[in-house]
Amino acid sequence: MADNGILFRLLLVCFMFTSYVTTKGADYASTYIICMDKSIKPNEFSTHEHWYKSLLSSVKSVTADQNTQSADFYHYTYDTVMQGFSALLTQSELDMLEEMPGHVLSFPDPEGNIHTTHSTEFLGLDPNSGLLPRSRFGQDVIIAILDTGIWPESPSFGDHGMEPVPARWKGKCVKGTHFDPSLCNKKLIGARFFNKANLAKYGTVDFSKDYDSPRDFAGHGSHTSSTAGGNYVEGVNSYGYAQGTARGVAPAARIAMYKVVWASASERAIGSDVLAGMESAINDGADVLSLSLGFDSVTPYFKDVIALGAFAAAKKGVLVVCAAGNDGPSRKTMYNAAPWIFTVGASTIDRTFKASLKLGDGTVVNGSSFYYSGSDPQKGATISSTPLRYDEGDPACNKKLEALKVNGSVLLCFNNTSRKIIDDAIAAGAVALVLVGVDTIGVTAYPDDTFPVAVFPPGDKGAVDAVLKYASLSDPVVGIQFGVTVLGFEPAPSVVEFSSRGPSFPSPNVLKPDVIAPGVNILAAWLPDTRGLNKYYIVSGTSMSCPHVAGISALVKAVHSDWSPAAIRSALMTTSYGVDNLNHTIGDLGRNGRPATPLDLGAGQVDAQRAIDPGLVYDLSVEDYVNFLCTLNYSAHQIQAMTGNEVLCSSDLDLGSDGLNYPSFTAIFRKNSASKSSTTFKRTITNVGDSVSYYKVVVEAPQGLKIEVNPSSLTFMEKFQKLNFSVTVEAEKNTRFEYGYLSWIDNNRHVVKSPVVVLFD
């Protein structure tokens, strides 16, 4: 819940400035966030906004042309995510502001990237029992989506069967290009757009590509919104695949769209627009914020606009759920890693859209395809034995294809993710295209109902090697069976190769991602087709995983309205699981199916049903996060930029004990340390289950890693009682990375499981 003491002690003022080029030629402007001491405001200014505009006018009067009005450069006023405003300034104007009394911190405003019929069933959500009916399907919980906008006419945003909008809601629907407030209803209760910084940097929006309104231009925002909280829609499919009834994870939840991603920025987001959207969502009364986008993964938290906004949300008791990013399978690629953010990686589900490639030597390898010939999608389409064309000297097919004599053949290309290759193959007369070494997220770059494309991801090394080896023989031929939707696919879930991995740069001592959730081949709402018909689309990415967890969090919030954001996250983390539907350790497709580690999947795959009754939770307050900031070697001004007030850090805080009461444990030891290294964590755990309960600890640790828990049992005598325990981790210096688990078990009714990770750095 929010800490009112901290809220009322806010002392910072922050300014944001977005780029433009001045007539002086050499003096360019960039976007900056500038934090100031709020107490410096002179008494003659009635409001901070009045003061901000006066400061802006003063620097403009020195550097700008006489006919330049400071109001032309003023964008947003911030009062929640930080205290300040956004405006356009040159470097020389910024320099002057930095010399003014009360200046604390300046940094550039960044740009960020945007990162179902069956997935809800795979998550175990049963409409007849458990979390869904107990939460009334998420009724009255409000999910704010910050994305590319929304297509309000989609049936997923219909309000049939819904009760009146909660009286506490303060948001609104704003008018814009091809968007009227009357398009909102009891499902879509808010729709705003934020593009002042975007317009300042890129100029007027190209209305052939975008709408100057909350309306979606790309489909991404409609997809994430309907995944989190879309209503029931029967008979949907994408190119004939994944047929069934679409519904969001929390089908009775309310949706509010905050459009912050724009075509004029090549589908990127400007930090000051995102901050304005987060501020509005928090003040409007949202319970959960879902952001399937991210900024530079190596940015420290005091320069990370999502981390800044999410910190303010935590003060208000609002949970922020973010995508982990799509830069896997390499380590240290994690986005949105702040511990007050719920960070989600991507996993597969047990549904696939199969294309079987039969090589001329009889070998059969299975890949993926969205090709739909118009026949029954359960029967698919067949290409009989046909010549295969492949150039080992140009495996990606970057050169002209005429020399390959592609006409009438199947074209094979290795590691080509360009959509243009389809057009090139068609122009060259190919009858089909086989792409190998293209990761799973690339599959959704090729949904096509007119031209056959089969994709074989690099994680399936056996299939890739078999295809390339055979293609190098003389006169190869292939046959392809397209278009079968397969349910019950094994193994599932798996960590998908594109999902970003930990540890994070800003705080490697906090395990990220927190969990994984379905993010591959997810069907949800999209833009209408060229005939104006409502369309549903299959997309992959951690962008799809994020709204799944946002929806589950909304359901848990509906049942446990008094739980803090940290308690909800803890419930989902400690009840997650680590085995697939073959009862094997969840595999990592980015490493040839080898067992995934906590750096890949965090605590595990979310379990929507178990999260409603976790037994115990690791709770966190804003003071805990402030203490954590004190351990990051940030300066006083940098911490002040995060917290909004001056902080006196204790000298005895350390990451392993007082720093953070997190539901996972990460120890970092130096490579040149002794033969054995150890550290001790201190944790406080809260009973949210039976009033009287008894837990014993169970430890799983490999050879060379010792985990001791003291005490080894906990007895709770009342609900919400808190008890303390410590965990001592000792590791031999024989590896860069090791991990185990500790679980608090209550007669097998509750299993409260946490990963324990050791890194040598």
Image: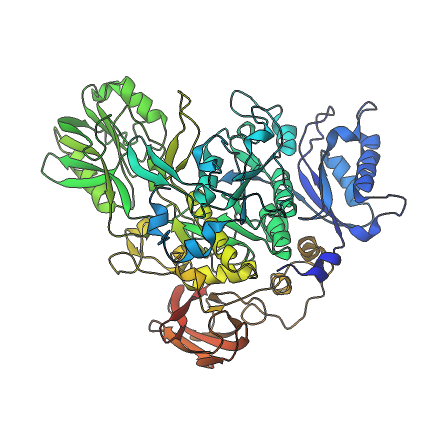
Picture quarter containing residue 226?
top left
State the quadrant of the N terminus: bottom right
Q: Residue at x 64, y 33 (%)?
A: 197
Residue 22 horizontal side relative to residue 337, left or right = right
The image shows residue 754, relative to residue 261, as above or below, that is: below
Image x and y of residue 277, in percent: 61, 41
Which residue is outermost to the right? 44
Q: Is residue 92 visible?
A: yes
The image shows residue 219, relative to residue 501, as above or below, that is: above
Picture quarter containing residue 64?
top right
Which residue is outermost to the left? 361
Residue 389 horizontal side relative to residue 535, left or right = left
Between 89 and 748, the one nearer to me in the picture: 748
The number of callouts visible is 0
Image x and y of residue 136, in percent: 46, 52
Q: Residue at x 45, y 45 (%)?
A: 251
Between 580 and 668, the one nearer to me in the picture: 580
Image x and y of residue 477, in percent: 13, 30
Image x and y of residue 644, in percent: 71, 55
Between 658 and 436, the one nearer to me in the picture: 658
The image shows residue 410, relative to residue 261, as above or below, that is: above
Q: Is residue 334 visible?
A: no
